[in-house]
Image: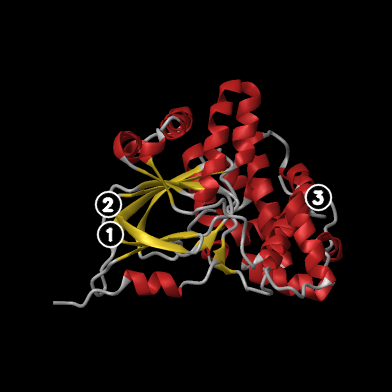
Amino acid sequence: MPKRSSSLERARAQEVTLEILPMSAFQSFRCFMHDYPTPGARYCVHVEYEIHLIRKGSGHYKIGGKIGKFKAGQVSIVGSRVPHDWVSDLRKNQVIRDRDVVIQFSREWLEKVRKTIPEINDFEQLLNQAQRAIIFQGESSIAAEKILESLTKYQGIEQVIKLMEVLLIMSRAPESDKEYVLEDPYEGDSSAVARLAAEKGVAYIFNNIDKKIRLQDAAKLSFMSDSQFSRVFKEGSGLTFSEMIRKLRIEHGCKMLSSTDLSVAAIAKDSGFTNLSNFNRQFLREMGISPRSFRLLDQRKKAELLENVFGHKNQLLQQAKVNVYMDRNSAQKSEFMTLIDAERIRRP
């Protein structure tokens, strides 16, 4: 009989990777199933909150450095920037189809919704508790699992409503139905430098998408020299700075093509391209079709194409390795690391 690989040994050996998850132009959050093993299933950290259902199999999870056991039916929520993975026990060459249901959403999105629907305040405590990672038990787990099992079948506003139902179940779960994975809220690890470089760089690109973007300016935001920022950004995001600029500008162009009647030339300019021919060439390179052809696609095909290019299947964005540069508990921190720590403390 084929020997089973050790999920415990594999969980212990994992190094954290950084995920940068551009959202589809047609979604407020990401909802998908995935097989195991798959390139996107690894010990990773991202700014989005994650709700996770294990549908099949058993093994060991690794969350915030802590390792525990899981089995089919486990429902959990993991906070922003909390590293996590679920490592299944496998026979040789085994693949578990549709092992997980995954939902990823940002706190910023919920805050925007809250401005329109004040009752969303009910979720604030849940999001804070999620920094310890919660595994749900009892009736709360059963109720959430039932909705999560069917969530990928819904689209549009129906899917949003179902997500709100899951969040409501979790926020109202009694303490007896909650198992906290971590004793204290997770505050991050020693990969702060690469993560900060990637986040600052991407934010700078987004904020200046229609302007001239300079690596030197992004480097200053992370308190780095140009060469250091360039190296660390690549290690933190999986892409060079220029590659990330191109991807985000093309993604912006896709959103404009889908949501406005502006000419392709006007959209090219709004996306930061100095001439139309360069926009057409780069768009074709990234998307596989021309801007005009993309505009003619129906909404579903546009969403599928964007997901394939910019979503969780994009291994360049999924497998960005985060190097550990310094022990954040070291007594001898440089002035540079002091600035980095100060920046992290200022984050909401």
Which dot, 1 or 3, sits closer to the camera?
1
Image coords of residue 165 (percent x, y): 42, 29
> Label 1: how many residues lie within 10 Å, few (<14), some (14-19) or many (20+)?
many
Q: Mark 2 points at which residue?
A: 72
Q: Is residue 61 left or right of residue 105?
A: left
How far apart are the alpha carbons under marks 3 and 2? 45 Å
Q: What element does badge 3 sit on?
A: loop
Q: What kind of residue is marked 3?
A: Asn
Q: Nearer the viewer, residue 326 or 222?
A: 326
**Residue at 68% across, 40% down:** 256
Q: For residue 217, which quarter of the picture?
A: bottom right
Q: What kind of residue is marked 1?
A: Ser
How far apart are the alpha carbons under marks 1 and 3? 45 Å
Q: What kind of residue is marked 2?
A: Ala
In the rendered image, which quarter contains the N terminus? Answer: bottom left
Q: What element does badge 1 sit on?
A: strand
Q: Name the residue under label 3.
A: 208
Q: What element does badge 2 sit on?
A: loop
Image coords of residue 266 (percent x, y): 77, 42
N-term-proximal mark, 1 vs 3:
1
**Residue at 35% across, 52% down:** 100
Q: Mark 1 points at which residue?
A: 58
N-term-proximal mark, 2 vs 1:
1
Query: On screen, 347 above or below 192?
Result: above
Image coords of residue 301 (percent x, y): 48, 44
Image coords of residue 133 (percent x, y): 48, 49
How far apart are the alpha carbons under marks 2 and 1? 6 Å
Q: In this view, does 158 lie to the left or right of 265?
A: left
